[in-house]
Amino acid sequence: MSYTEIVKFGKSGKAEGLIDIKNAWRGAVAIWNIVGDRYLGKYIPDYVKNNPSIPQRDSYSRLGDEGELKKVWSLLNDDKVSEVDRICLGTTMDWVIVRRKNLPELIKAFREFEGETSLKEQADAIEAAMNEDSELKAIAWNQTSVCENRWLSYKYHNLKDESYPYNLKRHKEHWNLFEEEAESHKEQEKQGVNN
């Protein structure tokens, strides 16, 4: 069965596996579908709308429609979306990290998110790690084990036949969800003042 991989970064900055949360469909995909339906309305694909012989359901997953999925992802920067939903959606994005100082806010958002997901289990695991590991500096996700975990296999060395993990101190592809959130709010406030 697939799983959502939570990765931790310690003092060295090197990515290490923290915990696997069973059934990746309860992670990013569930969040995308819930947030999409909540803010964009129920999704029914055109092929269903245009074919009366297909029995219609209340809602379908946006996962198979790249344009619809991009609309969901763009909700990360939409002020109409609640902070809890933006935080949870943000954790599904590529190369996102959350620093230790923001983990309490992340855990709170995970527990407050409404919908059938693995977020409450993730919150418990992250809280336990935070309480047990004083050297924990940040966490990140590989939302589905079906894909290679790029945090743990960032660079491959052919001669040594080894993969090297991502390192927060050396590599620059990551972004901090809460810093981006703060920057986004500052920019929107500035635009509001100027308008």
Image: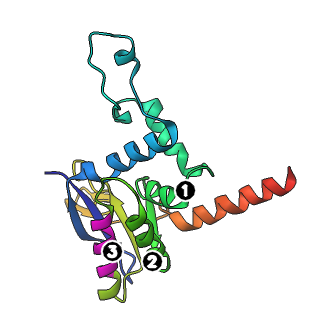
42 on left or right of 79: left
* Image location (x, y in percent) of residue 29: 33, 46
Categorize mark 2 by other alpha carbons within 10 Å: few (<14), some (14-19), many (20+): some
In the image, which residues are magenta?
120-129
Earlier-in-chain disc, 2 versus 1: 1
28 on left or right of 4: right
53 on left or right of 84: left
* Image location (x, y in percent) of residue 135: 37, 87
Name the residue located 48 percent from the left edge and 35 percent from the top edge.
41
CA gap, disc 2 and disc 3: 9 Å
Front residue of 122/149: it is 122
Q: Secondary structure at mark 1?
A: loop
Identify the residue position indicated by label 3 in the image.
126
Categorize mark 3 by other alpha carbons within 10 Å: few (<14), some (14-19), many (20+): many
Look at the picture and state if 50 lies above or below 58.
Answer: above
Of tags 2 and 1, which is closer to the observer?
Answer: 1
Name the residue located 42 percent from the left edge and 59 percent from the top edge.
91
Of tags 1 and 3, which is closer to the observer?
Answer: 1
Which mark, by number, is residue 82?
A: 1
CA gap, disc 2 and disc 1: 17 Å
Which mark, by number, is residue 104?
A: 2
Earlier-in-chain disc, 1 versus 3: 1
Categorize mark 1 by other alpha carbons within 10 Å: few (<14), some (14-19), many (20+): few
- Colouring rule applied to residues: rainbow
CA gap, disc 1 and disc 3: 22 Å
Amino acid type, mark 1: Ser
Q: Secondary structure at mark 3?
A: helix
Amino acid type, mark 2: Pro
- The answer to which quarter of the image holds residue 57 is top left
